Image (cartoon, helix red, strand yellow):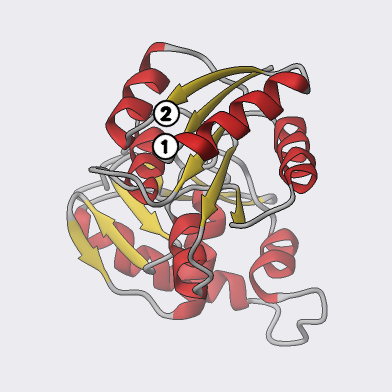
Amino acid sequence: MRVLVVEDHEPMAEILERGLQEEGYAVDLAGTGEDGVWMASENEYDAVVLDVMLPGADGFEVCRRLREAGRWWPVLMLTARDAVGDRVRGLDAGADDYLIKPFSFNELLARLRALVRRGAAERPPVLRVSDLTLDPATHIVERGGSRVNLTAKEFALLEYFMRHPDEVLSRTRLIEHVWDFAFEGDSNVVDVYIRYLRKKVDRPFARNSIETVRGSGYRLRAEVIDADPT
Protein backbone atom coordinates (compact mmCIF):
# COMPACT_ATOMS: atom_id res chain seq x y z
CA MET A 1 0.00 0.00 0.00
CA ARG A 2 1.30 3.45 -0.92
CA VAL A 3 0.45 6.38 1.35
CA LEU A 4 1.01 10.10 0.89
CA VAL A 5 1.76 11.92 4.16
CA VAL A 6 1.37 15.72 4.03
CA GLU A 7 2.90 17.10 7.25
CA ASP A 8 5.10 20.18 7.69
CA HIS A 9 6.36 19.38 11.20
CA GLU A 10 9.49 17.34 10.48
CA PRO A 11 9.60 15.29 13.71
CA MET A 12 5.96 14.26 13.25
CA ALA A 13 6.53 13.53 9.54
CA GLU A 14 9.50 11.30 10.41
CA ILE A 15 7.49 9.43 13.07
CA LEU A 16 4.66 8.82 10.64
CA GLU A 17 7.02 7.77 7.87
CA ARG A 18 8.98 5.36 10.06
CA GLY A 19 5.91 3.88 11.73
CA LEU A 20 4.04 3.33 8.47
CA GLN A 21 7.07 1.83 6.80
CA GLU A 22 7.46 -0.61 9.68
CA GLU A 23 3.88 -1.69 8.99
CA GLY A 24 4.74 -2.36 5.35
CA TYR A 25 3.45 0.83 3.76
CA ALA A 26 5.33 2.69 1.03
CA VAL A 27 5.39 6.32 2.16
CA ASP A 28 5.84 9.59 0.25
CA LEU A 29 6.28 12.80 2.26
CA ALA A 30 5.19 16.33 1.38
CA GLY A 31 5.98 19.30 3.60
CA THR A 32 3.54 21.85 2.18
CA GLY A 33 0.01 21.81 0.83
CA GLU A 34 1.20 22.74 -2.65
CA ASP A 35 3.71 19.89 -2.66
CA GLY A 36 0.99 17.51 -1.53
CA VAL A 37 -1.31 18.55 -4.36
CA TRP A 38 1.52 18.24 -6.87
CA MET A 39 2.55 14.77 -5.65
CA ALA A 40 -1.06 13.63 -5.73
CA SER A 41 -1.31 14.79 -9.34
CA GLU A 42 1.80 12.82 -10.31
CA ASN A 43 1.28 9.56 -8.41
CA GLU A 44 -1.35 7.03 -7.40
CA TYR A 45 -1.96 6.37 -3.70
CA ASP A 46 -4.09 4.07 -1.60
CA ALA A 47 -4.64 6.74 1.10
CA VAL A 48 -3.58 10.23 2.19
CA VAL A 49 -2.65 11.30 5.72
CA LEU A 50 -3.15 15.06 5.71
CA ASP A 51 -2.29 17.58 8.42
CA VAL A 52 -4.64 20.55 8.71
CA MET A 53 -2.10 23.21 9.73
CA LEU A 54 0.16 23.58 6.70
CA PRO A 55 2.07 26.56 5.29
CA GLY A 56 0.37 28.04 2.27
CA ALA A 57 -2.63 25.94 1.33
CA ASP A 58 -3.95 24.34 4.51
CA GLY A 59 -5.31 20.81 4.78
CA PHE A 60 -8.88 21.90 4.02
CA GLU A 61 -7.77 23.52 0.77
CA VAL A 62 -5.58 20.55 -0.18
CA CYS A 63 -8.44 18.12 0.36
CA ARG A 64 -10.79 20.27 -1.67
CA ARG A 65 -8.29 20.46 -4.55
CA LEU A 66 -7.76 16.69 -4.51
CA ARG A 67 -11.49 16.06 -4.79
CA GLU A 68 -11.92 18.67 -7.51
CA ALA A 69 -9.12 16.94 -9.45
CA GLY A 70 -10.92 13.61 -9.21
CA ARG A 71 -8.54 12.11 -6.64
CA TRP A 72 -10.81 9.93 -4.51
CA TRP A 73 -8.30 8.13 -2.30
CA PRO A 74 -9.38 8.00 1.35
CA VAL A 75 -8.13 11.03 3.29
CA LEU A 76 -7.37 10.93 7.03
CA MET A 77 -6.96 14.45 8.41
CA LEU A 78 -4.75 15.21 11.41
CA THR A 79 -5.22 18.29 13.58
CA ALA A 80 -4.23 19.73 16.92
CA ARG A 81 -7.47 21.70 16.98
CA ASP A 82 -10.38 20.04 18.75
CA ALA A 83 -13.08 22.46 17.64
CA VAL A 84 -16.19 20.82 16.21
CA GLY A 85 -16.32 23.46 13.49
CA ASP A 86 -12.88 22.45 12.24
CA ARG A 87 -13.85 18.78 12.09
CA VAL A 88 -17.03 19.65 10.24
CA ARG A 89 -15.09 21.84 7.81
CA GLY A 90 -12.61 19.04 7.09
CA LEU A 91 -15.28 16.44 6.50
CA ASP A 92 -17.24 18.80 4.28
CA ALA A 93 -14.06 19.46 2.27
CA GLY A 94 -14.06 15.77 1.36
CA ALA A 95 -12.06 14.12 4.14
CA ASP A 96 -13.09 10.61 5.17
CA ASP A 97 -11.93 10.63 8.79
CA TYR A 98 -10.42 12.92 11.41
CA LEU A 99 -7.81 12.25 14.11
CA ILE A 100 -6.92 14.77 16.82
CA LYS A 101 -3.33 15.21 18.00
CA PRO A 102 -1.89 13.79 20.17
CA PHE A 103 -3.10 10.37 19.03
CA SER A 104 -2.20 6.73 19.47
CA PHE A 105 -0.26 5.46 16.47
CA ASN A 106 -2.18 2.17 16.76
CA GLU A 107 -5.41 4.12 16.37
CA LEU A 108 -4.04 5.87 13.30
CA LEU A 109 -3.14 2.50 11.80
CA ALA A 110 -6.59 1.09 12.56
CA ARG A 111 -8.33 4.07 11.00
CA LEU A 112 -6.05 3.91 7.97
CA ARG A 113 -6.76 0.20 7.49
CA ALA A 114 -10.50 0.88 7.68
CA LEU A 115 -10.24 3.65 5.10
CA VAL A 116 -8.15 1.56 2.71
CA ARG A 117 -10.75 -1.22 2.91
CA ARG A 118 -13.34 1.23 1.61
CA GLY A 119 -11.23 1.96 -1.45
CA ALA A 120 -11.29 5.04 -3.66
CA ALA A 121 -14.98 5.32 -4.44
CA GLU A 122 -16.03 8.66 -5.86
CA ARG A 123 -17.41 10.85 -3.07
CA PRO A 124 -17.50 14.44 -4.33
CA PRO A 125 -18.33 17.05 -1.66
CA VAL A 126 -20.41 18.95 -4.25
CA LEU A 127 -22.77 16.88 -6.40
CA ARG A 128 -22.91 17.66 -10.12
CA VAL A 129 -25.34 16.33 -12.71
CA SER A 130 -25.07 18.12 -16.03
CA ASP A 131 -25.39 21.86 -15.28
CA LEU A 132 -27.03 21.22 -11.91
CA THR A 133 -24.94 21.44 -8.72
CA LEU A 134 -25.86 20.73 -5.10
CA ASP A 135 -23.71 21.33 -2.03
CA PRO A 136 -24.91 19.17 0.91
CA ALA A 137 -22.86 21.23 3.39
CA THR A 138 -24.11 24.71 2.48
CA HIS A 139 -27.48 23.62 1.02
CA ILE A 140 -26.76 25.68 -2.10
CA VAL A 141 -28.31 24.50 -5.37
CA GLU A 142 -27.43 26.08 -8.69
CA ARG A 143 -28.37 25.43 -12.28
CA GLY A 144 -26.11 26.91 -14.92
CA GLY A 145 -24.65 29.19 -12.25
CA SER A 146 -28.04 30.52 -11.11
CA ARG A 147 -29.17 29.93 -7.54
CA VAL A 148 -32.22 27.72 -6.98
CA ASN A 149 -34.05 28.12 -3.67
CA LEU A 150 -35.52 24.89 -2.30
CA THR A 151 -37.30 23.88 0.88
CA ALA A 152 -35.60 21.32 3.13
CA LYS A 153 -37.66 18.43 1.76
CA GLU A 154 -37.23 19.54 -1.87
CA PHE A 155 -33.48 19.72 -1.24
CA ALA A 156 -33.44 16.22 0.27
CA LEU A 157 -35.37 14.80 -2.67
CA LEU A 158 -33.09 16.44 -5.25
CA GLU A 159 -29.99 15.29 -3.34
CA TYR A 160 -31.18 11.68 -3.47
CA PHE A 161 -31.81 11.97 -7.20
CA MET A 162 -28.36 13.49 -7.75
CA ARG A 163 -26.71 10.65 -5.85
CA HIS A 164 -28.40 8.23 -8.25
CA PRO A 165 -28.36 9.90 -11.70
CA ASP A 166 -29.93 8.01 -14.59
CA GLU A 167 -31.34 5.47 -12.14
CA VAL A 168 -35.09 4.80 -12.04
CA LEU A 169 -36.27 5.40 -8.47
CA SER A 170 -39.64 4.05 -7.36
CA ARG A 171 -42.03 6.08 -5.22
CA THR A 172 -41.58 3.59 -2.38
CA ARG A 173 -37.79 3.95 -2.47
CA LEU A 174 -38.01 7.73 -2.52
CA ILE A 175 -40.36 7.76 0.46
CA GLU A 176 -38.10 5.40 2.42
CA HIS A 177 -34.98 7.48 1.81
CA VAL A 178 -36.31 11.03 1.71
CA TRP A 179 -39.08 10.68 4.25
CA ASP A 180 -38.76 7.45 6.30
CA PHE A 181 -40.07 3.92 6.67
CA ALA A 182 -42.75 5.04 9.11
CA PHE A 183 -44.14 7.74 6.83
CA GLU A 184 -47.94 7.64 6.94
CA GLY A 185 -48.79 10.74 4.96
CA ASP A 186 -50.49 11.13 1.60
CA SER A 187 -49.43 8.37 -0.81
CA ASN A 188 -49.01 10.89 -3.64
CA VAL A 189 -46.56 13.07 -1.68
CA VAL A 190 -43.73 12.05 -4.04
CA ASP A 191 -45.69 13.18 -7.09
CA VAL A 192 -46.47 16.48 -5.39
CA TYR A 193 -42.80 17.15 -4.58
CA ILE A 194 -41.70 16.09 -8.05
CA ARG A 195 -43.97 18.83 -9.40
CA TYR A 196 -42.41 21.31 -6.97
CA LEU A 197 -38.89 20.35 -8.12
CA ARG A 198 -39.74 20.55 -11.79
CA LYS A 199 -41.21 23.99 -11.22
CA LYS A 200 -37.93 25.18 -9.65
CA VAL A 201 -35.07 23.27 -11.30
CA ASP A 202 -36.45 22.48 -14.75
CA ARG A 203 -39.03 24.92 -16.08
CA PRO A 204 -37.20 28.21 -15.38
CA PHE A 205 -34.20 26.79 -17.26
CA ALA A 206 -36.12 25.15 -20.14
CA ARG A 207 -35.04 21.68 -19.02
CA ASN A 208 -36.67 18.25 -18.75
CA SER A 209 -34.26 16.66 -16.29
CA ILE A 210 -36.72 14.86 -14.02
CA GLU A 211 -38.33 12.18 -16.12
CA THR A 212 -41.41 10.09 -15.37
CA VAL A 213 -40.90 6.38 -16.08
CA ARG A 214 -44.42 5.04 -16.34
CA GLY A 215 -45.17 2.18 -13.98
CA SER A 216 -41.75 2.46 -12.33
CA GLY A 217 -41.10 5.90 -10.85
CA TYR A 218 -38.85 8.81 -11.72
CA ARG A 219 -35.35 9.39 -13.04
CA LEU A 220 -32.96 12.34 -13.07
CA ARG A 221 -31.29 12.36 -16.46
CA ALA A 222 -27.55 13.04 -16.44
CA GLU A 223 -27.60 14.72 -19.84
CA VAL A 224 -29.22 18.09 -20.41
CA ILE A 225 -32.60 17.72 -22.12
CA ASP A 226 -34.24 20.90 -23.34
CA ALA A 227 -37.92 21.27 -22.68
CA ASP A 228 -40.34 21.02 -25.57
CA PRO A 229 -41.08 24.64 -26.51
CA THR A 230 -44.61 23.60 -27.37
Please provide percent x and percent y for residue 103.
Answer: 68, 54
Q: Are marks 2 and 1 in contact (CB under 8 Å)?
A: yes
Classify mark 1: helix, strand or loop.
helix
Looking at the image, which residue is at 39% across and 59% down? 135
Image mark count = 2
x 33%, y 37%: residue: 65
Is residue 70 left or right of 212 when viewed as pictured?
Answer: left
Question: Which is nearer the eye, 13 or 181?
Answer: 13
Q: Nearer the viewer, residue 135 or 7?
A: 7
**Residue 201 relative to residue 89: left or right:** left
Left or right, residue 228 beside residue 166: left
Give the farthest residue toward the bottom. Answer: 185
Question: Is residue 179 found left or right of 133 in the rendered image?
Answer: right
Q: Which mark is residue 21?
A: none
**Image point 39% across, 46% down: which residue?**
59
Residue topped by disc 2: 70
Q: Is residue 90 above or below residue 111?
A: below
Location of residue 166 in the rendering, given as x and y in whole percent from the top left corner: 53, 38
Residue 86 appears at what percent x and percent y? 45, 66
- Between the C-alphas of marks 2 and 1, the distance is 5 Å
| Other-residue count near label 1 (Cα within 10 Å), few / some / many at <14 / 14–19 / ≥20 | some
Q: Which of the 4 image quadrants contains residue 114?
A: top right
| Above or below: residue 77 compared with residue 31 | below
**Which residue corresponds to mark 1?**
67
Q: Secondary structure at mark 2?
A: loop
Q: Position of residue 225 (x, y in %)?
A: 32, 39
Q: Residues within 10 Å of mark 2 (few under 14, many from 20)?
A: few
Residue type, mark 2 in image: Gly
